[in-house]
Amino acid sequence: MAFVGGVGAVKNGAAGALSSKCGVAGHARAVAGVPRVRSVRVAARGSDGVVAMAVQAPELEEKARAELKALYEKTPCMPIMVRLAWHDAGTYRAATNTGGANASIRYGPEIAHGANAGLKIAIDLLEPIKAKVPEMSYADLFQLASVVGIEFGGGPKIPFKMGRKDATEEECTEDGRLPDATQGMKHLREVFYGMGLDDKEILLLSGAHTFGRAHSDRSGFEDKPWTKKPLDFDNTYFVELLANNDPSLLRLVSDEALMSEEELLGLVKLYAEDKEAFFKDYSAAHVKLSELGCSL
Ligand code: HEM
Ligand code: HEM
């Protein structure tokens, strides 16, 4: 399978350089000519007391956005960025006010959790961008990569605020906070309610599976996407869930669970019919997820 080349190459530790070596039309497209972003003025007062021009948050965000778009032009890694941001934020537990969108996922103890298999690829792809916007926290960059990825894939423009603080390694969460794809609503409720999210938000956020696919060498699930166009962010996840007529598409137990109760099924039908309603409601749920554990 074509994608395996990418993963294998990344495993060899060359993520930063490899996309520029790809012969694939889609990947190579931008290598030829993504406009370079003009450099940002460097920030703040040095130890010598010299005050440089401050980098304003909007300017920093714009630079990071441009770099992310350039990455997506070369390498269609938008879905794995959405999964990275979600797995960082989804460790939040309201009861203890621990976890959340704090980039603790980048440390050894947390990236090694089974649920995070493959996400090192996403972090490695972002490191060169982080080096260009060192003033931006990893936590902000991970969430921005997701928001820009969704927009790049034709999805909603999700409001974004900067200001997340990076965790220390000691703040890594224990394994087992993210949901298990082989379980139904009872389990999903336990996990998402723990984050402070409700049934409708579980359903809306699961709609992000309109993007990307499973990788057997990461999660162990079959190498299948949820929709026929996994690089388009739209409402077809719900359309395919209802249609249930294409064996080439993936359906996890946790996806099926969204049709197991009348009220939830009503929402699946609503969002399958009305893309704009999905985009509007998804955006609000995504903002909430992306800010878990942060006071912005
Ligand atoms: C005909 C060959 C190829 C095609 C059609 C292709 C297509 C794709 C697609 C559709 C994705 C989206 C994510 C996914 O589905 O997993 C992807 C991701 C990716 N590809 Fe490729 N690709 C090819 C070869 C390569 C090669 C040769 C490299 C390395 C030089 C590469 C590097 C990557 C990377 C780093 C990602 C993003 C991270 C990930 O999710 O694995 N690809 N590719
Ligand atoms: C409801 C509970 C959820 C479960 C059990 C679940 C499970 C999974 C599994 C098993 C994969 C396949 C990973 C792989 O093999 O690469 C996956 C992929 C993915 N998930 Fe989820 N997920 C859930 C919720 C979410 C949420 C809330 C989001 C984002 C808001 C999300 C976004 C994604 C994306 C974009 C991918 C594709 C990644 C790629 O193509 O590389 N998921 N999910």
Image (spheres, rainbow, N blue to C red):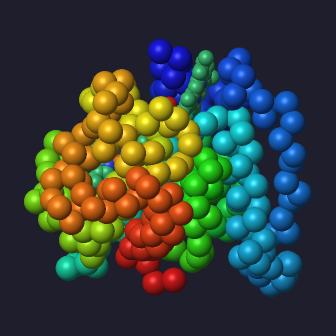
View extreme (left): residue:
186
Q: Residue at x 83, y 41 (%)?
A: 34
Residue for point 71% across, 49% down:
69
Can residue 20 be seen from the camera position used here?
yes
Instruction: Pick the residue in front: 175 or 159.
Output: 159
At which x and y percent is residue 14? 60, 28
**Number of marks in the rendered image:** 0
State whether residue 255 is above or below residue 86.
above
Where residue 95 appears, as percent x and y from the top left, is 20, 79
Q: Nearer the viewer, residue 108 or 113?
A: 113
Q: Residue at x 86, y 78 (%)?
A: 53
The percent coordinates of residue 17 (x first, y second) are 68, 30
Q: Is residue 191 left or right of residue 224?
A: left
User: Between 26 and 130, which is closer to the camera in this rendering?
Assistant: 26
**x and y percent of residue 293 in the render?**
38, 76
* Quarter location, residue 159: bottom right
Let me know if residue 168 appears in the view: no
- In the foreground, 173 or 264: 264
Task: Say left or right for 60 vs 149.
Answer: right
Q: Is residue 108 left or right of residue 15?
A: left
| Residue beneath the point at 86% across and 48% down | 36
